[in-house]
Each structure stands twice: as C-alpha cells, then as structure tokens.
Image (spheres, rainbow, N blue to C red):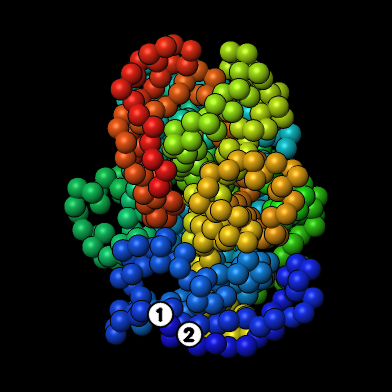
Amino acid sequence: MGIRGEAGVRAPRGPAAAVPGTWVVSTAPGGVPLLGHALRLWRRPLEFLASMPAHGDLVAIRLGPQRVWLACDPDLVQQILMDPRTYDKGGPLYDTMRMVLGNGLVTCPQNVHRRQRRLAQPCFRPSRIADYAEVMSTEIGAAVEEWRPGRELDVTDAMMDLSARVTTGVLMSTSLDPGLAAEVRACLATAMRGVLLRAVVPLGPLYKLPTPGNRRFDRALARLHHIIDQIIAERRAGPARHDDLLATLLEATDDGGTATGNDPAPYGASAPDHASAPDDASAPDTCPAAGRPTTAPTTREAPHAKEPLTDQEAHDQLMTFLVAGIETTALALAWTFHLLAAHPEEERRLHDEVDTVLAGRPPAPADLPRLAHARRVVTEALRMYPPGWALTRVTTTETTLAGHRLAPGSTVLYSAYVLHQDPVAFPDPQRFDPDRWLPERAGSVPSGAMLPFAAGNRKCIGDHFAMTEAVLALAAIAARWRLRPPAARTVRPVPAAVLSPGPLPMVCELRGRPDGGAAQAVPSQAP
Ligand code: HEM
C-alpha cells in the first residue's frame, strides 16, 4: 500500500493508552506523477479523505508539487488546535476569505486574534444569546409564514433565507429597514458564492477580468462594504441607543482579562448534549502560548489592547459574523431536514416532543431547555454532515507532529467529517442516531472526536448562537410542517468550502391534514 511507517511516541489516549504506542506516518497510496493525489481529491474529496485513516495517523497527500499533511487521529487534531501559535490559520481558503473578511476573527492571524476575540466575546455571552433568541423566533416565524401547503421548496435555499434573516436581524436589527435587509441578504448570497468559487477554483488574475460574473461579485461586495460602513458611521455619530449585536460590539472594550473564547471543553465529556461547550467568558485561555508578546508581523498593526474596535475592525467583524454565521447554520438545518425525511421514525419522535412542549404554538426561547430531542437531532446532523468539513493550518515554525518533523510553512489539514466517521468513537457511524447524544451515551464519546465547531482558542464563537437558532427553527417548522421530497433521490454531499446537500427539493405538508397538500411525496433515501 505504499505505507512508510515512522515511529513517534503516541500520546496517551484513554485508559488503554497507559502503554504508549507509536504513530503511523505515511504517504497516501495511489499518487500519480506530477499531479500526485490532486485528481482523486478533486473528484471525490470525502471518499478520498475518509479512506486515509486506514493508512496512518498522519498521512501525506501530494497536490502537484505541494504536500499537505492530513491528521487522522483526534489526538493529533487536538495538538494542532491547541497550539495556534505553531499551527496558524493559512491556506487558499483563508487567503480568499480574507478578501471579504479582512482581519476578522475567522481569518486573522494568531498575533491579533487575542484582542479580537476578547472584544467580540461580549456579543456571544449567554445573556446576550437569550436576548437574541427573541429576535430569532420573530425572524423564523416571518420566514416560515410564507410557506404554503403543497408548495415545493428548495430546502437548502429556504434555510439560507431563514438563517440570513435571523443573522442580519440579530446583528443589526435596529439599523435595517426591510428593503435594506433584503438587499444585504442578496449581496451576501452573491459574495459568498464568489468567495467559494475563488477558493475552490483558484484562477487568480482571471477573476479580475470584466466578465458578468466577476462584475456581479465586485458590485455585491462593494455594496456590502458600503452598507456596513454607513451603518457603523451612523451608529458612531448618532445618540440613539441600540440593542443588537452590533451595539454590543461597538461598545466593547478590552479589559485585559484572560478570556479569549468559549470554553473548549471536550465533546463527550462535560458539554450538555454535545452540541456546544459552555460559553464561559471567564474560562481560562486555552492557547498554550497566550500571554506571550505578539511578534509575528500582521497585515495591520493592532491598536492598543484596551481600545475599543476601530471602524475597520468593527467592519471586518460584522462581515465575518454574517459570512460565518449564515451558511453554516443554514446547511446544518438543511441536512437535518434531509435526515428526518429519510428517517420517519426519528421524525415522529421529534413531532412528539414539539407537540408536547409547544402544544401547537410557535417556540419561545423559554422552551429551549425542554426541546432536548430537537437539540440531539441537530447535533447528530452536525456529526454526520459537519458544515466545516475540512480546515487547514500552516506551521509558523519547525515542529514535530506524530514524531514527524514538519518544516515551517507546512500545511496541515484535518477533517471533522473524517473524525466523525470513526467507528470507535461512533459505533455504526453511517447511522442517523440522535440518541447517541443522550447524556448517558454521550459521555463515552472520546474527547476531540466530535468537532463541528472546532476546538481551542479558534473554536467557533457562534456555537451557542447557532444551536439556539437551529433548535428554534427546527421546532417552529416541525410544529407545523412536514417536509417531503417529491421523488426518491439520493442526496450526495457537495464538499465545497462548506459541506452542502446541494439543492434539496421538498414539498411542504401541513401537519395534521390527511393529505398535507403533498399526496405524491415519497420518503427520501439516506445517502
Ligand atoms: C452550525 C453552525 C456553525 C458551524 C458548524 C460553525 C463552525 C465553525 C468552525 C468549524 C469554526 C473554526 C474555523 C476555523 O478553524 O477556521 C468556526 C469559527 C468561527 N465561527 Fe462558526 N460555525 C457556525 C455558526 C456560527 C455563527 C452563527 C457565527 C456568528 C454569528 C459564527 C462565527 C464564527 C467565528 C467568528 C469564528 C472564528 C472564531 C475565532 O477564530 O476566534 N459561527 N465556526
């Protein structure tokens, strides 16, 4: 199989690892001259990556002249994520995203991250999420209000629309009239499609040509930047009080505390329902290097640590929240409805819960603790189809991983999709089984095996926001609607920057009506 075994001392893993083992470092088999594994990765990325753990814990994949290291073992992934100074953000996806997001939280290098995260953290405190949940419920209600029995929806599009309403509503509700909000959503959709294309098909200068597609992308981006600049300028100038996420962001000052983010408590250990770890703004900084003076150069000098965000920083952060928050949550919901349509028994259990808890009314934030099964359904969808399915880091210095020396500038890759398929952590991993996340079973999921929101100090800051939105949306829709595919079809994941089901046509059936308005609908097939 072309495996080049290399011995390193394996980190202790669970009780069995009291005896240290060795890591297996290898090169992926089947590379061809010049291209290496590029064609296989391009054609069937999920299958290709999912086959790699059979070849080693750390596997070299050749993409033309470049080599990328895939970390297949959860312990190696933890080492990478817990040492962000050595493994910094980098690679083509981040480089392209930086065009739109500037130095926002997702794309900023490690040396400015600490300040950015501290200033953004107040926006994601549990008390704020509770306030946002009211806005979320209203926006979800408005989005679903437009559905009609018997109507065929592209559920992926419908969830994008819903999530865009929720996110723009929460972020800057008090600055957007409905016309402007719709324009922001349309520009975002064009900009996000453009970023994706540029990240996946890096044609460099060709994107500067005045083609209709490039012009649309440039216009949408320019308009978005303009609208956001205007909103920030109005907020800074005006005496009016606002109560949305942007207001919290603009008021935040860095008090020099130790918090950099949500507590990265391991999945499988202490986090309730394993959907997201507790958001604790006073949690200790988990970056091993935190507190070191910043030395690496950055694209922009960070202002003094205690100063509030500059206009440019606030701009980048707002764009980041819009881009990072909308598509990810929308796809988590789209996958959830796909899985429920393919598993009528699980759908029935969900309906039982929402009928008991809601008794026919729309969900309110106070219902969230009682929608435990809905939360498990979303968590299981995130396990099977994590939107952030593959992420890269670039080494800033020489280091050793799995006993193997990595030169500075090496690209390492990890895939939540691959980790979530591990049969040891998740028996029968292809099975949609929300009960995995019952407290009595979830405790046996090894630390680091479940990473839909990543881990360490670059862990998703919006995890609670996303889970709150997803559970409220799922309950609101399940209370009234059943979504049925109009014809049997196999849905294959589309692994672009985020993992999408692609178009997902489904017919809206009104629950409780014998015909539901969609008599011909048939159950979908799980992939
Ligand atoms: C189901 C929905 C979501 C998923 C699966 C998800 C997943 C992730 C993942 C995997 C990362 C790490 C990215 C990396 O290492 O490059 C991340 C980071 C981030 N996410 Fe999310 N996310 C979701 C929703 C949201 C929402 C709703 C927001 C904000 C409104 C958000 C804002 C961010 C930000 C700002 C970061 C960067 C954090 C940092 O580096 O400090 N995400 N997310």
Instruction: Find out if the beta carbon at label 2 lies less than 8 Å from the nearest ligand 1 atom.
Output: no
Q: Are marks 2 and 1 in contact (CB under 8 Å)?
A: yes
Q: Secondary structure at mark 2?
A: loop
Dividing the picture into quadrants, the one containing residue 7 is bottom right
Percent position (x, y) of residue 448?
66, 60
Going by the image, does 142 lie left or right of 197?
A: right
In three-dimensional space, the C-alpha distance between marks 2 and 1, rounded to whole angstroms, equals 7 Å
**Type of the residue with mark 1:** Pro
Q: Is residue 93 left or right of residue 465?
A: left
- Residue drawn 30% across the image and 44% down it: 219
Q: Which residue is mark 2?
A: 3
Residue position for label 1: 29
Q: Earlier in the sequence, mark 2 or mark 1?
A: 2
Query: Can residue 40 be seen?
Result: yes
Taking the image as shown, residue 206 lies to the left or right of residue 315, namely left
Q: What is the x, y in percent for residue 199? A: 37, 60
Amino acid type, residue under disc 2 in the picture: Ile
Q: Could you tell me which quadrant the N terminus lies in?
A: bottom left
